[in-house]
Image (spheres, rainbow, N blue to C red):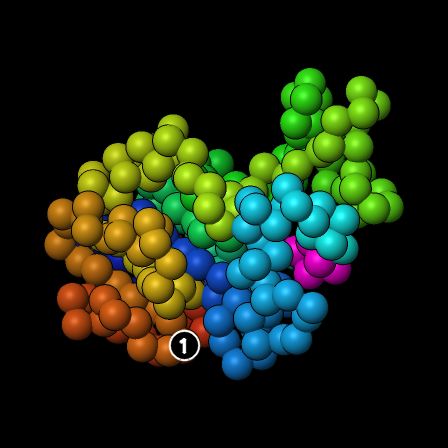
Amino acid sequence: MKTLQEIIDSSKRIVFFGGAGVSTESGIPDFRSVDGLYNQTYAYPPETILSRTFFELHPREFYRFYRDKMLALDAKPNKAHLKLAERERKGKLSAVVTQNIDGLHQKAGSKNVFELHGSVHRNYCMDCGKFYPPEYILHSEGIPRCECGGVIKPDVVLYEEGLDSATVTGALREISAADTLIVAGTSLSVYPAAGFLDYFRGRELVLINRDPTPADRKATLVIHDKVGKILSEINI
């Protein structure tokens, strides 16, 4: 903790790169841990359900899973989200790059957030483009439809879909300009997001994750612990 504090105190441009482990302390399950979604039993594997092909071929089953497992609208920001938002307000954090789709960084007060995989809080008609809030999806039945009759799709990146180019460009710009990159709560096993670390040219790479990651050997500092616990102990 002393080393982490020293790194943060000496940094002028910090970027935070986070994954599912940032939100688990808010009660949102991750995907790859022992008790995560990928180890639960459904009629289809979650990787299949959350694909563009499945969405198009079996939209009713997609939305049954999506409402049940992906819409954690009552979740609240935890210590990690709140601490990052506080650092940004004080000018000590340049950006948050997240693989999460829960919107908890914004709910905590963070402004410069790059959501690589989209957000459950944005939903659009595939025909006319009309916006719908997540509550509309949650309380609809079967396949949610627009008043024009079109199917409403969450603005989340499904398997087989590419990342939004503007979001990617912005995230890579921030990572490339950072002198310290804090990577937390991610297994760094999902690409292309995991490859974003290759664009970091700064001095200090900090990894905070419950389990080891492929990038541990490249890091200045590695901490195997809960993200919220560690960040809450850092002084602003």
What's the magenta region?
65-71
Magenta run includes residue 70? yes
Residue 43 image offset from top left, x and y in percent: 69, 68
Magenta run includes residue 42? no
Q: Which quadrant is home to the C terminus?
A: bottom left
From this view, report whether residue 11 is shown above or below residue 150: below
Q: Is residue 81 visible?
A: yes
Q: Residues within 10 Å of mark 1 (few under 14, many from 20)?
A: some
Quadrant of the image occupied by residue 155: top right
Extreme residue toward the front, this view:
57
Q: Which secondary structure, mark 1? A: loop
Horizontal side of 181 relative to 150 (left or right) equals left
- Observer-nearest residue: 38 or 215? 38
Query: Which residue is drawn at the image coordinates 33% and 49% (left, top)?
Result: 192
Horizontal side of 27 relative to 209 (left or right) equals right
Which residue is identified by label 1?
210
Query: Which residue is drawn at the image coordinates 23% and 67% (left, top)?
Result: 215
Query: Which residue is drawn at the image coordinates 42% and 34% (left, top)?
Result: 164
Query: Which residue is drawn at the image coordinates 58% and 53% (left, top)?
Result: 50
